[in-house]
Image (tube, helix red, strand yellow):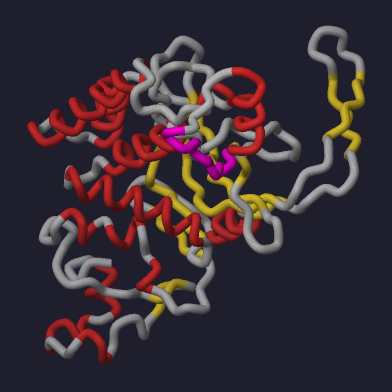
């Protein structure tokens, strides 16, 4: 928390008034179950890249023994400890070694129908956040739509720096539609020829600190946001990074719902680009290449890596 916050002043009043060095007392007191760590200044006195570092890439704030970290914007999200622990628990999905029977009700006939979920490997989420869902027909590939949606939700006025970021993203979308920026194997996984922004809410994030894939994703988001430096526009930078990964066939389509729960799971893919001299773009050999070049990233135990979203219906 900021050293100017009410919480910091309530817990560390004497230390702050006497200007005792931070490293002698910081993090020694709790509010409920939470250890309170104080940062000097306010969120507005820091450069944007410093302010957002703890949100995007908090690894250095914690001990090496910490495996997961959660960010919550207390002004936008009310989160109980039980809810937080529930999300932590659902960051992993156990493997299924044999088909699993599941009974559903047919919407037309009303009859019970048995379906069978196929075997699946252990799934492991390296990053979690919320995502808005939209009615069919809403253009999620339009950078202007994306930016205006974020500014409206966060009460942000457009600036020339935000306009520059949006204009760059518009040009990116143009290059995507002309296939100049896509992975050569994208059509096997993303048939739509547009730039698929993710309309995220970065008010609630969960990071997997021990995952190299998770670290790469966090760093990519942090670097993108720091490049533009537009305060409170993290959702724009994050949505761009995830869309770019989809376009480059580094993030797959949502996995089929093979479990009970509202979460959406998207696999982290490991693309293998063909050599420029020997590139094959058609025929049976290219189909073999497509099949072998897109594999879900796994750890040493064969656990598959995913990005997970908790979808929310957009309120008009």
285 or 82: nearer the eye?
Answer: 285
Say above or below: 171 vs 254.
Answer: above
Q: Per the image, is 124 magenta?
A: no
Q: Give how far across and how far down residue 295 sits, in percent.
A: 62, 42
Q: Residue furthest left?
A: 160
Looking at the rendering, in which quadrant would you find the N terminus? bottom left
Q: Give how far across and how far down residue 26 sits, in percent.
A: 29, 83
Q: Which residue is drawn at 50% across and 36% down?
A: 274
Q: Give how far across and how far down residue 46 sits, in percent.
A: 14, 61
Q: Residue at x 59, y 38 (%)?
A: 293
102 or 282: nearer the eye?
Answer: 282
Q: Is residue 37 left or right of residue 248?
A: left
Q: What stretch is highlighted in magenta?
A: 266-277
Q: Give how far across and how far down residue 2 sits, in percent.
A: 22, 67
Q: Per the image, is 274 magenta?
A: yes
Q: Is residue 138 left or right of residue 260?
A: left
Looking at the rendering, in which quadrant would you find the C terminus? top left
- Could you tell me how many numbered marks the image carries? 0
Say above or below: 140 vs 26.
Answer: above
Q: Residue at x 46, y 59 (%)?
A: 70
């Amino acid at each position: 928390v900021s050293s100017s916050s009410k919480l910091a002043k309530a817990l560390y009043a004497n230390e702050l008034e006497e200007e005792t060095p931070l490293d002698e007392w910081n993090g020694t007191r709790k509010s409920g179950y939470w250890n309170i760590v104080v940062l000097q200044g306010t969120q507005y006195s820091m450069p944007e890249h410093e302010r957002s570092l703890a949100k995007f890439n908090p690894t250095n704030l914690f001990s090496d023994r910490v495996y997961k970290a959660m960010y919550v914007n207390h002004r936008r999200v009310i989160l109980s400890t039980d809810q937080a622990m529930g999300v932590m628990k659902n960051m992993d999905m156990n493997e299924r070694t044999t088909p699993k029977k599941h009974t559903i009700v047919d919407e037309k006939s009303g009859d019970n129908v048995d379906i069978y979920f196929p075997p699946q490997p252990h799934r492991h989420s390296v990053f979690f956040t919320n995502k808005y869902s939209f009615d069919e027909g809403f253009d999620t590939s339009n950078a202007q739509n994306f930016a205006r949606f974020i500014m409206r939700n966060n009460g942000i006025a457009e600036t020339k720096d935000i306009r520059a970021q949006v204009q760059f993203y518009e040009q990116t979308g143009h290059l995507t539609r002309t296939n100049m920026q896509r992975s050569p194997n994208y059509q096997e996984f993303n048939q739509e020829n547009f730039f698929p922004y993710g309309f995220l809410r970065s008010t609630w994030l969960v990071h997997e600190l021990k995952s190299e894939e998770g670290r790469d994703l966090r760093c990519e988001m942090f670097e993108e946001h720091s490049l533009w430096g537009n305060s409170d526009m993290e959702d724009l930078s994050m949505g761009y990074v995830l869309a770019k990964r989809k376009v480059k066939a580094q993030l797959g389509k949502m996995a089929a719902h093979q479990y009970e729960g509202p979460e959406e799971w998207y696999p982290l893919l490991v693309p293998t680009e063909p050599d420029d001299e020997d590139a094959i773009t058609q025929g049976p050999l290219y189909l073999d290449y497509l099949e072998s070049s897109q594999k879900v990233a796994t750890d040493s135990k064969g656990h598959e890596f995913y990005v997970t979203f908790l979808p929310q219906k957009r309120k008009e």
